[in-house]
Image (tube, grey):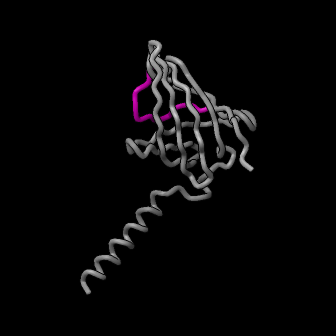
Amino acid sequence: MKKIIVSVLILGFGTIYAQKNKPQANKIDKKLVGIWKGGEKDQQIEGVEKLWVMDRKEDGTFTLIFTTVQDCEINQHVEKGQWWIENGEFHELHFDSGNTDVYTYQIVDNSHVKYKAKSLSMEMADKEYTFIDTKIEDEN
């Protein structure tokens, strides 16, 4: 009987924790859903060009494929996580690191969004880190 009660409590707390950490549907800006591309050079790390493709889902999950170019060496990295809007700001939780980055954002038009870093998990070469994402596929 004790094992059943402990199991039910663990399951219950696990469900509450998962719901607490999952962005609510009303915290998703549907204009940001879809597949986006972007890039920057020398802003994050001096001498490094970074290109990416971001697949942002309506359920608040994302997959991000980074390609970096430095001294003619090309590397690729895939990150997964959750995204949501809170207090008018874009939040991005990276599952690998457990870090959350926060950006202000401005929808320029249906195909372009401008982001400006507010709070980042890593230090940037440029303290005013900004970038523009371009939509490359419309959701049906």
Q: Position of residue 119 (x, y in %)?
A: 46, 35
Q: Is residue 127 visible?
A: no
In the orientation shown, which residue stands out farthest toward the bottom? 1
Question: Which residue sits at x=71%, y=40%?
Answer: 137
Question: Which residue sits at x=70%, y=33%?
Answer: 112
Magenta-highlighted residues: 114-125
Residue 102 vs 73, above or below: the answer is: below
Question: Is 12 inside the magenta-drawn segment?
Answer: no
Please indicate whether residue 38 sits to the left or right of residue 2 in the image.
right
The answer to which of 40 and 74 lies nearer the viewer is: 74
Residue 49 vs 97, above or below: the answer is: above
Q: Position of residue 62 (x, y in %)?
A: 54, 46
Q: Position of residue 3 (x, y in %)?
A: 26, 80
Q: Is residue 94 visible?
A: yes
Question: Which residue sits at x=40%, y=35%?
Answer: 121
The answer to which of 111 and 69 lies nearer the viewer is: 69
Please indicate whether residue 110 sits to the left or right of residue 6 in the image.
right
Check the picture and name the quadrant holding the N terminus: bottom left
Residue 64 vs 45, above or below: the answer is: below
Question: Which residue sits at x=52%, y=24%?
Answer: 50
In the orientation shown, which residue stands out farthest toward the left? 2
